[in-house]
Amino acid sequence: MKKIYLILSLIISLMTINSVALGENGYPEMQMSYSVTVCQNGCDFDSIKNALRNTDQSDIEIIINTPILTESDIQISKKVVIRSGLPEKVIIKGDIEKQAGRERIFLITDTGVALFKNLIITQGFAKSFHRAGGGINNHGVLIVDNCEITENKAYQGGGIWNKGELTIYNSRIVNNKTIRPTAKEIYEALGCRGAGGGIKNEKPGKLVLQNSIVSNNEANTSGGGVFIACESEARLIDTRIHDNKANETGGGVHNRGVLTLEQVIITDNYSRIQGNGLHSYGVMNVTNSNILGNKGKNDCTLGTGKGFLGKGTIELNQNSELGLGNCQIQ
C-alpha cells in the first residue's frame, strides 16, 4: 500500500509533464514523439547541442550511442529525454582533461521538462548563473533515473542545483564539491547562505530523492551532501547519505526548509562546527531512519535561535534513531 501511495504522489507532483507513463521499473517515463541518435560518426547528430538546435519538434528523445561524449553548456527549454543507447551508462563530461570543466553540463530552463536516464554526468564547472550547479542547474522539471553525477564543481550545488521540480531515482551523487565564493558572489548572495556539495535545493524548489546514494561530496560552507534552502521542500526515501564533509554545519544534510526522511541512513559524515550528520533550522518529519555513527561529537542538531537562524523542529519522529545531539530529545 505504501509503494502505491509513493508512486501516486510522485505522479501528482509531476503533473506538469503531459505524457507521463510508468515504465517497467515502476517509475515515471516520458513518451516522446520524435527520436534521434548522437555519436561521433554514423548518427543523426554529433552532439546533444546540435540535436536540440536542429530539430523543430516540441518533444524529442536523444539516444547517445557512444561511450563518452565531451560536451558542456547544454541548455534545455523544451520536453527532452536523453538516455544511453548502449547496454551500459554513457559518460557526458565537460572537458577532455579531468576537472578542467569549461562550463556546467546541463541547464534546464523554466520551460524545460527533461528525463535523464543511464548517464554519467561529470567534470562540469559552473561559471554562470551565480556559478550554481556544476553538473546540472535545473529551473524546470527534471527526472534523473539510474545516473551518476560525479566530480563536478560549483559555488553552490557542486553536483546539482535545483530551483524547479527535481526527482532522482536509483542514482549516485558522489565526489562533487563546492568552491570558495568571490567577494562579489558573497555580496550578491543567492538565497539562503550555504553550499550543498552534492545537491542544493533552492527556494522554491521541490526535491524527491529515492533509492539513491549521496557520498564523498564536500561543501565549502554547509550541507556537505545536501542543502535544503529556506522555503524549499525535500523528500528523501530509501537513500543513504555517507562520507560527506562540510566546512561549517551539516556534514550530511543542512536543512532550512521542510525535510521528510523515510528509510534514510545518514552516517560517517563530518562537519567542522556542528551537525556532523544533519543540522536543521527548518521542519523535519522522520520515519524509519537512522542518523548514527557520524564523525565528531554529534549526529543530529537543531538550531535553537530565532528569526533567520531559527529554531529547528521535528514534527514527526517515528521508529528512528537520531543519535548524539539535541534532535533525539525534542
Image: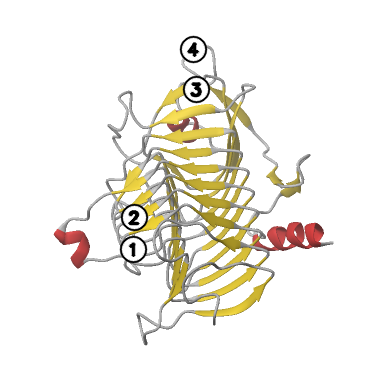
Q: What residue sits right under mark 1 in the picture? A: 194
Q: What residue sits right under mark 4 in the picture? A: 41
Specify the quadrant that holds the C terminus. bottom right
Q: Amino acid at mark 1?
A: Gly
Q: What residue sits right under mark 2 in the picture? A: 156
Q: Amino acid at mark 2?
A: Gln
Give the mark, 2 or 3, whose residue is nearer the N terminus.
Answer: 3
Specify the quadrant that holds the N terminus. bottom right
Asked if the residue under mark 1 is in contact with the one under mark 2, i.e. CB atoms within 8 Å, the reply is yes
Of the two numbered discs 4 and 2 in the rendering, the one whose residue sits closer to the viewer:
2
Mark 2 and mark 1: span between their CA atoms? Answer: 7 Å
Side of 210 where 96 appears, left or right: left
Could you say where residue 328 lies in the image, as x and y percent from the top left? 55, 75
Mark 1 and mark 3: span between their CA atoms? Answer: 39 Å
Q: Amino acid at mark 4?
A: Asn
Q: What residue sits right under mark 3 in the picture? A: 45
Of the two numbered discs 4 and 1 in the rendering, the one whose residue sits closer to the viewer:
1
**Hey, which quadrant is residue 116 in on the image?**
top right
Mark 4 and mark 2: span between their CA atoms? Answer: 36 Å
| Colour scheme in use | secondary structure
Residue 322's mark?
A: none
Could you say where residue 53 lies in the image, as x and y percent from the top left? 45, 34
Asked if the residue under mark 2 is in contact with the one under mark 4, i.e. CB atoms within 8 Å, the reply is no
Give the mark, 4 or 1, whose residue is nearer the N terminus.
Answer: 4
Give the mark, 2 or 1, whose residue is nearer the N terminus.
Answer: 2
Of the two numbered discs 2 and 1 in the rendering, the one whose residue sits closer to the viewer:
1
Q: Amino acid at mark 3?
A: Phe
Mark 2 and mark 3: span between their CA atoms? Answer: 32 Å
Within-10-Å neighbours for mark 1: few <14, some 14–19, many 20+: many
Q: In the displayed structure, would residue 329 be above or below residue 217? A: below
The residue shown at (36%, 65%) is 249
